Amino acid sequence: AQSVTQLDSHVSVSEGTPVLLRCNYSSSYSPSLFWYVQHPNKGLQLLLKYTSAATLVKGINGFEAEFKKSETSFHLTKPSAHMSDAAEYFCVVSNTGGFKTIFGAGTRLFVKA
Amino acid sequence: DSGVTQTPKHLITATGQRVTLRCSPRSGDLSVYWYQQSLDQGLQFLIQYYNGEERAKGNILERFSAQQFPDLHSELNLSSLELGDSALYFCASSDRSRRGYNEQFFGPGTRLTVL
């Protein structure tokens, strides 16, 4: 069985400070893991993906995530937040073939000036 | 632009009515997914089609149905609409032929308002 838990429903940071959005997953096989971002009234956009290659994955807009199998985590980070990063972020786990894709509940990121 | 198109962008209708939402996947993508996003329920997976066949079902109500046509576009039919069906409905597509790459590309969504 698969599941994904985003540990924070809301995260607030100041512009220029680091961002950490936490995601834990469970899967009975090697999963594919993704982070998506959704800006208000927009569709979801893929930020980055892990598919069993390098454990540190770099995405768009300066985001990266590290796959830690021992901790079953896939946390999303960014060294310096920008106002345009304010959005909702979804952690997603999927099996090969995409027949079982589970979305986390989402974390809303607020960025203060 | 993800390459996934959805029509219409907005839909306003009354309770008890029936509507059809349309989705065209990215060129070459065989899988289509439908999601419902509302304030109280979050993002809910409804159903997935692969090359015309239903492959996975999520929290889809019996009043809702979907299909994928030979040209791979998909339609989501919502009937006997209730106020609680007001939501953003997203379509996504993916290319399952590349092993391990199950990323989904999302359309801009259809905002349904039931009055």
Image (cartoon, coloured by chain):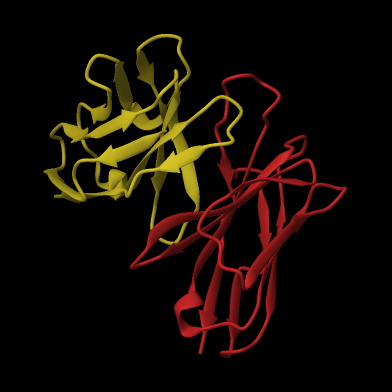
Chain colours: A yellow, B red
Provide residue A26's location: percent of width, then percent of height: 33, 29
The residue depicted at 31 percent of the width and 48 percent of the height is A106
- The residue nearer to you, when weighing B84 against B10, is B84
The residue depicted at 53 percent of the width and 53 percent of the height is B58
Residue B3 lies, with reference to residue B88, above or below; the image says above
B56 on left or right of A108: right
B44 on left or right of A91: right
Quadrant of the snapshot with the N terminus of chain B? top right
Residue B48 lies, with reference to residue B8, above or below; the image says above
Provide residue B77's location: percent of width, then percent of height: 69, 69
Q: Quadrant of residue A102?
A: top left
Residue lying furthest right: B70
The residue depicted at 59 percent of the width and 74 percent of the height is B10
Residue B42 lies, with reference to residue A49, above or below; the image says below
Provide residue B82's location: percent of width, then percent of height: 52, 83
Provide residue B76's location: percent of width, then percent of height: 68, 64
- The residue nearer to you, when weighing A39 against A7, is A7
Q: Quadrant of residue B26?
A: top right
